[in-house]
Image: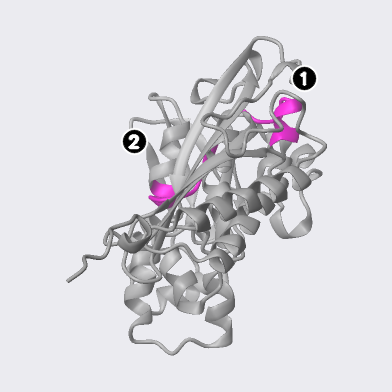
Amino acid sequence: MKKTKNSYKKSGVNIETSYNFTNYIKKYSEQSFKKKLNKTSKNNIGSFGSIFDIKPYKIKDPLIVSSTDGVGTKLEIANQFNKFDTIGIDLVAMCVNDLIVQGAQPLFFLDYIATGKLKLSKMKKIMKGIINGCKISNCVLVGGETAEMPGTYEKNKFDLAGFSVGIVSRNKILNKNKVRENDIILAIPSSGLHSNGFSLIRKILKNEKINKFLKKELLLPTKIYTDEILKLVKKNLVNSSANITGGGLIENIPRSIPENLGANIDLSKIKVLKIFKWLKSKNITDIEMLKTFNCGVGFCLITESKNVKKINRYFNQKFRPYPIGYVSRSSKKINLINKIKW
């Protein structure tokens, strides 16, 4: 009997599909970032490494800030609803929102997509979201990696990871050492669930009927705060900030306050979004809600009270910051006051 010759394609990896996807990304990326790409960095897609020229930014005493993250099990919701056009925005947001915590302007972004079998239509939708997220955050997609891994990922399963680099002048860095006693803590509203707590959400959904409200809320993309925060940094209106991701308010705000000071958070001031009220009704304790979800607060600013009115000018009504607490001398990193109003 004649033996069939082995090939990479027969093992489940189609290099030609990957090549076509790379060409698609290259063309789409160059069209999307035409104004921001110079001769040095315009041919990055498809290269072994990506080059980015920081000279045009003319930042005095520049420091590089980097961040990497993923979307977590929100990917499973995208698969369940067969909707992939916004999950890329989440990926970019999870990285760039960490960069701006230190006042850094996002420069460029790279993605990593791994899947069992590369499906071009699906991957193109994911990529459109990533490029959209880069546009919103005013950074450039300079490269990435796509891995087809049969046997590692089950049918239709995939994973996303992102990496972003930003730049900030040394004298503009936001850090906890700038925080002072009596500084005020401002909450910037989230767009919804963002990209945290989805393992718990998926557990709850096993016993729930998916209605229109849930279908809309579950895949709302994470709010990208770069435009507003960087304007505040430029005007020296913020001392420190916190991105409210995994761990919620309880774990993230203390990271932005020095050792001898503590955050006093009035939970009754939080403007809880409807989706979190729905989750709370599913037998979740207050403390579990606060540690798992953002509960309506996507980002926090720590500043002097005199700056609040100036800060509000840079936000539209939907995302306008509001006070939820203050900083005081304390050995306790966070003090929760009153009960949250569900």
Residue 325: give x, y in percent of width and height. 54, 45
State whether residue 47 is above or below residue 124: above
The magenta segment is 230-250
Residue at image x 71%, y 51%? 28
Report how many numbered discs are placed on residues in the image. 2
Given residues 144 and 55, the one toward you in this image is 144
Instruction: Confirm whether residue 146 shows in the render.
Output: yes
On residue 332, which mark appears? 2
- Graded by Cα atoms within 10 Å as few (under 14), some (14 to 19) or many (20 or more), the crowding at tag 2 reads some
Residue 122 lies in quadrant: bottom right
Q: Please, which residue is most extreme toward the front here? A: 1
Instruction: Tell which of 115 and 204 is nearer to you.
Output: 115
Q: Is residue 224 in view?
A: no
In this picture, residue 192 sits left or right of residue 38:
left
Question: Which mark is in front, 2 or 1?
Answer: 1
Q: Which residue is mark 1?
A: 56
Please, is residue 140 above or below residue 196 in the view?
Answer: above
Residue 57 lies in quadrant: top right
Residue 250: x percent and y percent? 39, 48
Residue 207 is tagged as none
Relative to 61, is 205 above or below? below
